Every structure is written in structure tokens, then in C-alpha cells.
Image (cartoon, rainbow, N blue to C red):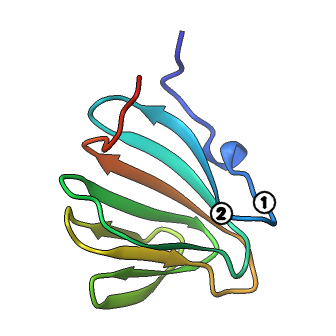
Amino acid sequence: MPSHFFDVAAAAAFSEKKMTKINLFESPRMFCDVYGLEPGQAQTQHVHEGSDKVYFALRGTCVVTIGQDKRELHPGELAVAPSGMAHSLSNESADRATLLVMMAPHPSFKG
């Protein structure tokens, strides 16, 4: 039976090769992942048509770019990339960064 409760900090993972994405939950309506970024790692600019994406900083800091707006996201802060707007993420700090990331509706649910 799937869990309804998650230890987000314990789920976070890191790789020297690239940013990690650990899925906590997904349905046809949404997904919720934990991203782990080592210093210097990034998610390149991309767009989701028909889905909104939320980045919530848990640990460390990341630079989030949404459209032309670029800001540093600190723990406890949230950024929203609306459908159709280009967005990217980068860890420009010297420390690891962990983010909770949600998107709705799920852009490619495979069940």
C-alpha cells in the first residue's frame, strides 16, 4: 500500500554527476519530487505547457530564473513557474541544496 507520509530529508539524494530527482508521489493530477543539487549543478532552462511548477527550498540556496526574473531562493522560500514560462535552477553556492518540487497537472504521468 502506498504511503501518505514522507520523510523528505531522508529521501534527498546527491550525485557528483548531475542533479538528482527523487519522486515521492505522483498521480495524473500532480507529482512531488525532491531535488538534490551539489555546488555547480543546474537544471537547464525549459518550459512546461499546461503545467505549473513549484520550487520550495528546504536546505541550501539556489538561483531560480523564471522568465526574466532571477532570484536566490533560501530555505523556506517558494518560487512558482507558471505554465508556458521558461524557468531554470542552479546551485551557485558552495553547499548542497535540497528542494521540494511539485508540478500540476502532471505533464507525463505513465502510471
Q: Amino acid at mark 1?
A: Ser
| Left or right: 71, with 83 as reference point | right
Outermost residue toward the top in this view: 1
Does residue 31 sit above or below 51 in this rendering? above
Which residue is rendered at x = 74% and y = 78% of the image?
Answer: 95
Mark 1 sits on what residue? Answer: 15
Does residue 66 sit above or below 70 in this rendering? above
Q: Amino acid at mark 2?
A: Met
The quadrant in which residue 70 appears is bottom left
List x then y, in percent, for residue 105: 25, 42
Real-space Cα distance between discs 1 and 2? Answer: 7 Å
Q: Residue 19 got which mark?
A: 2
List x then y, in percent, for residue 68: 28, 90
Q: Quadrant of the C terminus?
A: top left
Does residue 49 sit above or below 25 in this rendering? below
Contact, mark 1 vs mark 2 (Cβ under 8 Å): yes
Is residue 77 or residue 63 the one in the foreground? 63
Is residue 9 or residue 55 the one in the foreground? 55
| Left or right: 92, with 28 as reference point | right
